[in-house]
């Protein structure tokens, strides 16, 4: 009886060995999954057309009323980017503006002319309540053009926004060529 | 051992989740710039008072010496205009003056001229005998100020223009007048 038991154990071991060999020849099998992944990084591009006030003819030595100009911002994003907060971050001479609803300034290097912005959306509606610069300037330099979601920017050709600028009227001016650079950003 | 591996895998999954959350919160963005430009066009305005000699009483039938008057001319320019050559360009009857008095007034009937001269003074009064600046002798352009820098100050700059009737001219009673053009280049 004890011997039989031994044989059985031997056979068991042999079968175990065969099993291992069979596995090495891979007729029968097991399935497994291979993970394949990629992340498409969304991105946006901002292109602009310049805001040109053109020739300003002083009235009584001061800037006249109604001097305005339109610049355009085109935002184009990879579909699925989910961009938000397209905004005018700041101008290059903001510290020299009059800060009375005109927080931007043009300069010739020595003199400054304050101006404000109005931003309209593609549908013609104001995105910033009548003045791109918050009335109390509480918004600091965050002049939101469109808070988003900017789904229109993900369409072919992107989305274009008009930005209206208006020179502060009634302030003394200096005859020269003036300029400023606005920084525009989008978050995604 | 099996249990240990499970824990490692779970930890790996957790890290992946954190990574995705981090990506979602990232403030990636793009910036662009817009140029803004304007050209302020300088200009000047000239406001001139009237040069009124008033009543002239002949002396022995001729114009007396010392019949003079003056008027104020204000030139105001946009700062930065860089105006030059503020001057008396001409009168209506310049060719009818005499000598160094090349300006003249005319009576209403168009029959008689009354020569007069001008002197322009800004900071220093010129000789009464050189109503027309010596340098402009014979010319019809009398420079008031070649570089009217003060015109760019608030309120501009005032100039006094003196007029003097040519003495000794034969007079015909009547009212005489002329119009002098004052110009500035910028």
Image (cartoon, helix red, strand yellow):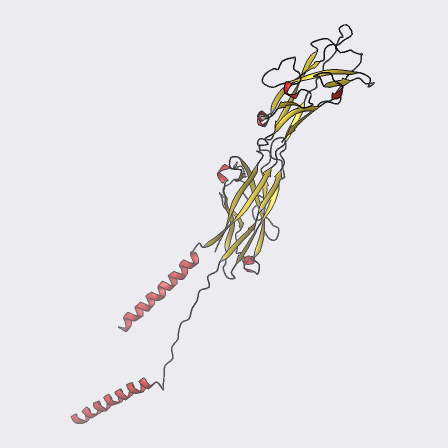
Is A147 situated left or right of A63 in this image?
left
Nearer to us in this view, A122 or A90: A90
Is B15 situated left or right of A40 in this image?
left
Residue A9 against residue B44 in the figure, above or below: below
Residue B129 in picture, x, y percent from top left: 65, 13
Is A187 situated left or right of A56 in this image?
left
Nearer to us in this view, B90 or A180: B90
Nearer to us in this view, B96 or A130: B96
Residue B17 in picture, x, y percent from top left: 39, 63
Residue B133 in picture, x, y percent from top left: 64, 18
Q: Quadrant of the N terminus of chain A?
A: bottom left
Nearer to us in this view, A185 or A142: A185
Q: How many marks?
A: 0
Residue at point 29% right, 87% down?
A21
Residue A63, by quadrant, is top right
Residue at point 35% right, 64% down?
B14
């Amino acid at each position: 009886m004890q011997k039989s038991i031994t044989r059985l154990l031997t056979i068991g071991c042999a079968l175990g060995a065969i099993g291992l060999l069979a596995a090495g020849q891979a007729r029968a099998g097991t399935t497994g999954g291979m993970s394949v992944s990629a992340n498409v990084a969304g991105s946006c591009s901002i292109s602009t057309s310049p805001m040109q006030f053109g020739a300003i003819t002083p009235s009584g030595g001061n800037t006249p009323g109604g001097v305005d100009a339109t610049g355009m911002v085109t935002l184009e994003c990879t579909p699925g980017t989910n961009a938000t907060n397209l905004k005018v971050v700041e101008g290059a001479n903001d510290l020299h503006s009059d800060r009375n609803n005109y927080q931007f300034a043009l300069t010739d290097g020595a003199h400054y002319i304050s101006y404000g912005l109005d931003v309209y959306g593609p549908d013609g509606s104001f995105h910033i309540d009548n003045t791109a610069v918050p009335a109390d300037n509480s918004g600091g330099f965050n002049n939101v053009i469109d808070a988003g979601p900017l789904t229109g920017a993900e369409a072919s050709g992107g989305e274009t926004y008009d930005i209206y600028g208006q020179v502060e009227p009634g302030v003394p001016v200096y005859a020269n060529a003036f300029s400023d650079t606005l920084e525009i950003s989008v978050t995604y | 051992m099996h249990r240990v591996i499970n824990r490692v895998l779970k930890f790996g999954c957790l890290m992946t989740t954190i990574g995705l959350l981090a990506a979602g919160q990232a403030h990636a963005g793009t910036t662009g710039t817009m140029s803004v430009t304007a050209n302020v066009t300088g200009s000047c305005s000239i406001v001139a008072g009237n040069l009124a000699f008033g009543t002239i009483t002949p002396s022995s039938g001729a114009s007396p010496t010392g019949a003079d008057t003056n008027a104020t001319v204000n030139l105001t320019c946009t700062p930065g205009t860089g105006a030059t050559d503020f001057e008396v360009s001409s009168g209506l009857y310049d060719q009818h003056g005499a000598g160094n008095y090349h300006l003249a007034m005319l009576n209403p009937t168009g029959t008689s001229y009354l020569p007069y001269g001008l002197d322009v003074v800004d900071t220093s009064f010129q000789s009464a005998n050189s109503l027309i600046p010596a340098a402009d002798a014979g010319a019809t352009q009398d420079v008031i100020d070649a570089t009217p820098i003060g015109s760019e100050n608030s309120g501009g700059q005032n100039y006094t223009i003196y007029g003097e009737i040519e003495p000794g001219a034969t007079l015909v009673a009547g009212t005489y007048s002329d119009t002098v053009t004052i110009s500035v280049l910028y």
